[in-house]
Amino acid sequence: MTEEKMLSRTQDSVGYIIFNNPEKHNAVSIEMWDALEKFLNQFREDNNIRVVVLEGAGGKSFVSGADISKFDKERSTKEAVLSYNKRTQKVYELIEAFPKPTIAKINGYCIGGGLNLAVCCDIRICSEKSQFAMPAAKLSLGYPFSSIKRLFDIMGPGMAKHFMFTAEKISSKEAVSCGLIQKLVSEENLETFVNDYAFTISKNAPLTVKAMKQIGIEVLKNPSERDLTLCESLASACFDSEDYKEGRKAFMEKRKPNFKGL
């Protein structure tokens, strides 16, 4: 694979990562997972980037999952399966713990590994035509604890079990009703809506957004594993910041604040 199967770009303070394999509904190979990790690390280190959007090219799919045509090479033996799962889990965990807000922009199919990817993001926004499925039961694939837990946490146990046991597709409206999708818009408005949504977040106080993101991660951990000291320090850092002074001043002057993350 060459990196044109995975693309990245920036616009203002938003970073975009594009799965560019539309002839296969943006199915993902090992090399594409590697490129995704590279782009995520670049955006994490770039202080100008405050929000990251993941999307699929072609207008038919977000990500349809693993590239089944590569199973003979990448997942044909027990050892290969373990290696593949370890690789993808690393990327899922990287997205889930990413220090900046992440948005899955979904237009079309969001299937299998693509769904696992989407639920690792903080926010999922889709077009009305989008469909979602976890077809593992039709392929005799196993899913690890972490992937199933994410579905339970987001969709609730009953809907998650229905989703996994039947391997049936659900519509965008059903996805909204069970909490899988946060915003549903028409296909023609999807790009503008997501761009505006990401830009709105990027203009909010970055220290506050960072604190909320990390504290939210701690909330979802087992109580015994939560770092409450970290949570307290992140909240305190907001009040100790120059941005806190700027926010108060802008409010009194009835203007938009200019937050700098300081």
Image: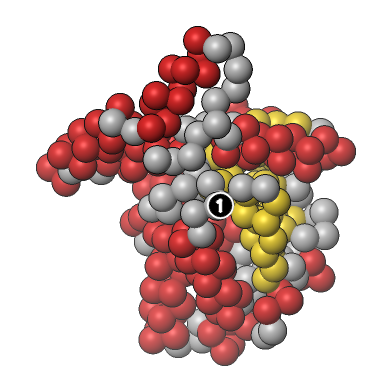
Q: From this view, report whether residue 67 is shown above or below residue 191.
A: below
Is 210 placed left or right of 34 in the picture?
A: left
Q: How is the image coloured?
A: secondary structure
Q: Position of residue 25 (x, y in %)?
A: 75, 64
Front residue (pair 143, 188):
188
Q: Is residue 220 visible?
A: no
Q: Position of residue 234 (x, y in %)?
A: 28, 37
Is 197 placed left or right of 141 in the picture?
A: right
Identified at 55% across, 12% down, the residue is 253
Quadrant of the rendering where the C terminus is positioned: top left
Q: Position of residue 173 (x, y in %)?
A: 69, 30
Q: Position of residue 179 (x, y in %)?
A: 53, 31
Identified at 80% across, 55% down, the residue is 60
Identified at 58% across, 74% down, the residue is 35
Identified at 39% across, 24% down, the residue is 245
Q: From this view, report whether residue 223 is shown above or below residue 167.
A: above
Front residue (pair 171, 43):
43
Is 201 placed left or right of 97 in the picture?
A: right
* Farthest right residue in view: 188
Is 5 placed left or right of 117 in the picture?
A: right
* Farthest left residue in view: 224
Quadrant of the rendering where the N terminus is positioned: bottom right
Front residue (pair 231, 131):
231
Q: How many marks?
A: 1
Residue labelled with disc 1:
49
How crowded is the residue under tag 1: few (<14 C-alpha within 10 Å), some, or many (20+)? some
- Looking at the rendered structure, the secondary structure element under dot 1 is loop
Q: Is residue 16 visible?
A: yes
- Which kind of residue does numbered mark 1 sit on? Ile
